[in-house]
Image: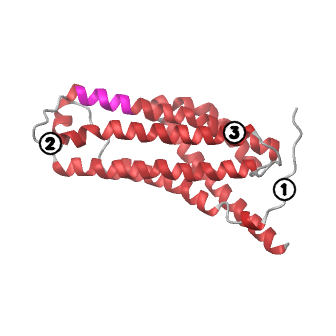
Amino acid sequence: MAPILPAPAPQRGDTNIGALQALGGCAFAVLYIVAFTTTGIDFDDTDRAVLAHYASSSARAKEVVAFFLIAAAALSLVVFGNGLRTAIARGTDRSDPLAALAWAGTTGCAALILAGNALSRATALAAMDDKFVLNPSTRKLFENAGYLLFVSGTLAAILLVAAVAIAVFRLRTLSRWVGWVSIVVALLLPLAIIFIGFLVFLVWVLAVSVSLWSHGRAEKATAVTV
C-alpha cells in the first residue's frame, strides 16, 4: 500500500490555483444547462416534429447558438481538468501517473463532447441550404451518433473522477468528502447511456469546483500568514 504523503507547503506562485479552475467547472455546468433548456434542441423525434424544427429559421439559429455554448462548455472543462491535474501533481514531489490519468480523462471527455456536438448540430447547418432535402431518418442517425459520442465522453470522464478519488485518499489533494463522492460518481457514470450519468457528472464538477475554490482560498491565506 502506497504511503499517504503530507501535502506540501504552498508556494507563492501557486496561490492563484483554484479560482480560475473552479470558474471553469462552473462554466461547464452552466453553459450545458443553458444550451439544453433555452435553445430548444431537445424536442420530439417524430418525423413531423423534425421537419417542422429544421424548417424554422429561428430553430436553426438556436441550434447554432447551442453549438457554441456546448463548445464553450467543453473548453471550460479543460480549464477545470487542468486545475485538478495541477492539484494532484502538487500533492507529491515525484512524477505521479494520477495527474496524467486525470488529464487523459479530461481531454478525452472534452474531445468527444466537441465531436458529438458537431455531429448533432450538422443537420441544422445543412438545413440552412435551400437545396438541402431533409430526411428525418438521416437526422435521427446523426443525432444518435452524436449522442453516443457524448456518452463516450462521459465514460472517458471516469478516468478523471477515479484519479481524483485516488489522489484524495493517497495525497490529501482535496477535502476527504470529494474522494468519497468521486467513488460513487465513478460507479454511476456508465448510466450516461440513459443520460443520468452525465447529469451526475455535472453535479460532481460543480461540487469539486467548490472544493477547488475553497482549497485555493485556504492556500492563499496560508501563504499570506507564512
**In the image, 160: left or right of 155?**
right
The residue that label 3 is drawn on is 163
Q: Position of residue 164 (x, y in %)?
A: 69, 43
Extreme residue in the left direction = 131
**In the image, 58: left or right of 77?**
left
- Judging depth in this view, the residue of 10 and 63 nearest the camera is 10
Q: Position of residue 1 (x, y in %)?
A: 88, 32
- Judging depth in this view, the residue of 178 and 143 nearest the camera is 143
Q: Residue at x 56, y 34 (%)?
A: 156
The residue that label 2 is drawn on is 129
Number of numbered discs overlaid on the protein picture: 3
Between discs 2 and 3, the one toward the N terminus:
2
Q: Residue at x 30, y 41 (%)?
A: 121
Q: Secondary structure at mark 1?
A: loop
**In the image, 142: left or right of 32?**
left
**Amino acid type, residue under disc 1 in the picture:** Pro
